[in-house]
């Protein structure tokens, strides 16, 4: 598979919209329930997702496999890219460079996040009901909290700027004016989605989740 393959690049672009877009929007809605409705609201959102019919296969086919291709091929493209911001210092070239860098960060962050959450559930170390407690434990660790902020900003930028590039490469936004308007829209999306994620992150550190985690620990000790 060559880095300049037309089919590979188109598939990579399309799958970036489907898995990464679905992954981010679904996570934004679920995580924002932690800010909006507290620990119980977050637990209810997680339960609703996991009660969907054939949820494992929906996620495997609709998110994880496409995301794996997009991530691995994206790393290959990033490795081949000529990052020449020192020579051509203009906005879109910087965006191109940041897209490659944020893609690498996002790829690492997503799999680290899955290790700390989904894999722990699969191994039986954490239940779906305890994911709020798990996120509280993660976000109250200062080192992880900073890493999660970096990962969230990278993922939301990669998604938003990638949507701008997708519309251009698929011939949807044609001409400088359409592309300029599109850039304003998607940078606005970047700000909104990033803020919602960060509010959720702060909520996981808050007193409500602290109390919920303490109550869960007391119940566990009693059992």
Image (spheres, helix red, strand yellow):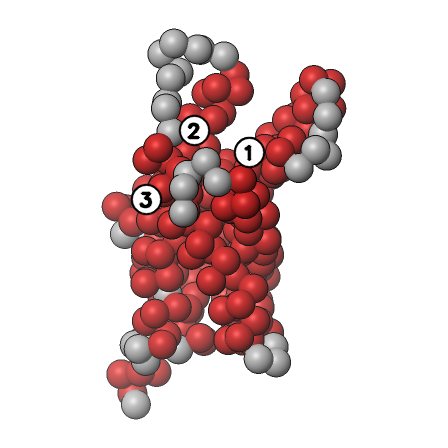
SS at mark 1 in the image: helix
Which numbered circle lies on residue 147?
Answer: 3
For the point 37% across and 22% down, the residue is 83
Asked whether the viewer can see residue 125, the reply is: yes
Q: CA distance from mark 3 to mark 2?
A: 17 Å
Q: Is residue 67 above or below residue 47?
A: above
Which numbered circle lies on residue 98?
Answer: 2
| Res. 212 image quadrant | bottom left
SS at mark 3 in the image: helix
The residue under label 1 is: 161
SS at mark 2 in the image: helix
x and y percent of residue 194 in the render?
52, 40
Q: Is residue 132 above or below residue 155?
A: below
Q: Are marks 2 and 1 in contact (CB under 8 Å)?
A: yes
Asked whether the viewer can see residue 34, the reply is: no
Tell whether 188 sits left or right of 173.
left
């Amino acid at each position: 598979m060559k880095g300049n393959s037309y089919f590979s690049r188109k598939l990579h672009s399309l799958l970036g919209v489907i898995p990464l877009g679905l992954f981010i929007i679904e996570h934004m809605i679920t995580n924002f329930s932690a800010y909006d409705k507290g620990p119980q609201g977050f637990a209810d959102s997680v339960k609703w997702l996991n009660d969907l019919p054939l949820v494992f296969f929906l996620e495997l086919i609709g998110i994880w496999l496409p995301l794996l291709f997009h991530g691995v091929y994206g790393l290959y493209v990033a490795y081949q890219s000529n990052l020449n911001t020192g020579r051509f210092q203009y906005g879109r070239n910087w965006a191109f460079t940041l897209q490659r860098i944020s893609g690498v960060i996002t790829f690492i962050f997503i799999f680290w996040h899955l290790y700390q959450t989904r894999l722990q559930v699969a191994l039986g170390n954490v239940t779906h009901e305890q994911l709020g407690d798990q996120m509280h434990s993660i976000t109250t660790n200062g080192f992880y909290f900073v890493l999660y902020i970096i990962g969230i900003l990278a993922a939301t930028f990669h998604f938003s700027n990638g949507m701008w590039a997708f519309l251009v490469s698929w011939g949807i936004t044609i001409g400088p004016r359409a592309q300029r308007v599109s850039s304003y829209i998607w940078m606005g999306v970047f700000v909104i989605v990033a803020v919602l994620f960060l509010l959720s992150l702060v909520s996981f550190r808050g007193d409500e989740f602290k109390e919920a985690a303490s109550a869960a620990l007391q119940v566990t000790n009693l059992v």
